[in-house]
């Protein structure tokens, strides 16, 4: 977990389990860009309460030199998202190797509003790809601290 808001809102014992659900296939380094993917999970806590989650997985491009890539592949196997081994052409220059590293944004809630959370994460991702006068943290703060929960039986806040 590289960032958490609000800080201290997640029990350290739960963090490991959430990371396993957020990236169920582990970390896969890719050679080609993949479109963002969304998945959901529900975690039942020790007290029987449920924690609902929406995960948005993005692949960010990283450029590495071929020498460091040789050392890197001894520890991790690079593969495509479908599990196929990539075909690397020997005629291509290996001075800079473009790889894509996964990043997963996870929205956790005690309320089961998964379609709305999916929409929120999608909009949040779009905001990060365009210049905005408002910092991204302000949007997150708005959702977590200022938007009230809808009354039972409805899915909209007026």
Image (cartoon, grey):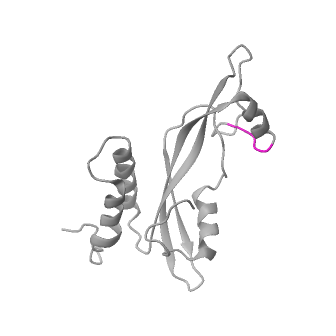
Residue lying farthest right? 74
Residue 104 picture location, percent across and down: 53, 53
Query: Residue at image x 66%, y 49%?
Result: 27
Quadrant in which the C terminus appears: bottom left
Residue 20, placed above or below residue 84? below
Residue lying farthest top? 91
Residue 31, placed above or below residue 152? above
Query: Residue at image x 59%, y 66%?
Result: 18
Residue 132, placed above or below residue 90? below
Residue 100 picture location, percent across and down: 59, 38
The image shows a total of numbered marks equal to 0
Q: Nearer the viewer, residue 104 or 44?
A: 104
Query: Residue at image x 79%, y 37%?
Result: 71
Q: Nearer the viewer, residue 43 or 106?
A: 106
Q: Magenta includes 15?
A: no
Quadrant in which the N terminus appears: bottom right
Residue 116 picture location, percent across and down: 35, 60
Is the magenta region chiefly helix, strand or loop? loop
Residue 68 picture location, percent across and down: 73, 35
Question: Seen in the image, is 80 located left or right of residue 34?
Answer: right
Residue lying farthest left? 158
The residue range painted magenta reads 75-79
Question: Seen in the image, is 72 located left or right of residue 12?
Answer: right
């Amino acid at each position: 977990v590289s960032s958490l808001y609000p800080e201290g809102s997640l029990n350290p014992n739960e963090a490991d389990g959430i990371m396993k659900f957020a990236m169920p296939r582990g970390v896969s380094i890719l050679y080609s860009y993949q479109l963002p993917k969304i998945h959901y999970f529900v975690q039942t806590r020790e007290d029987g309460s449920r924690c609902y989650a929406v995960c948005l997985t993005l692949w960010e491009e990283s450029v590495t030199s071929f020498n460091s890539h040789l050392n890197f592949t001894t520890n991790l196997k690079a593969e495509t998202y479908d599990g196929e081994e990539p075909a690397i052409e020997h005629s291509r220059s290996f001075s800079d190797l473009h790889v894509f590293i996964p990043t997963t944004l996870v929205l956790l809630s005690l309320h089961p509003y998964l379609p709305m959370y999916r929409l929120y994460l999608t909009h949040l991702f779009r905001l990060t790809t365009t210049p905005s006068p408002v910092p991204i943290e302000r949007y997150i703060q708005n959702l977590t601290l200022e938007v009230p929960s809808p009354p039972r039986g409805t899915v909209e806040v007026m």
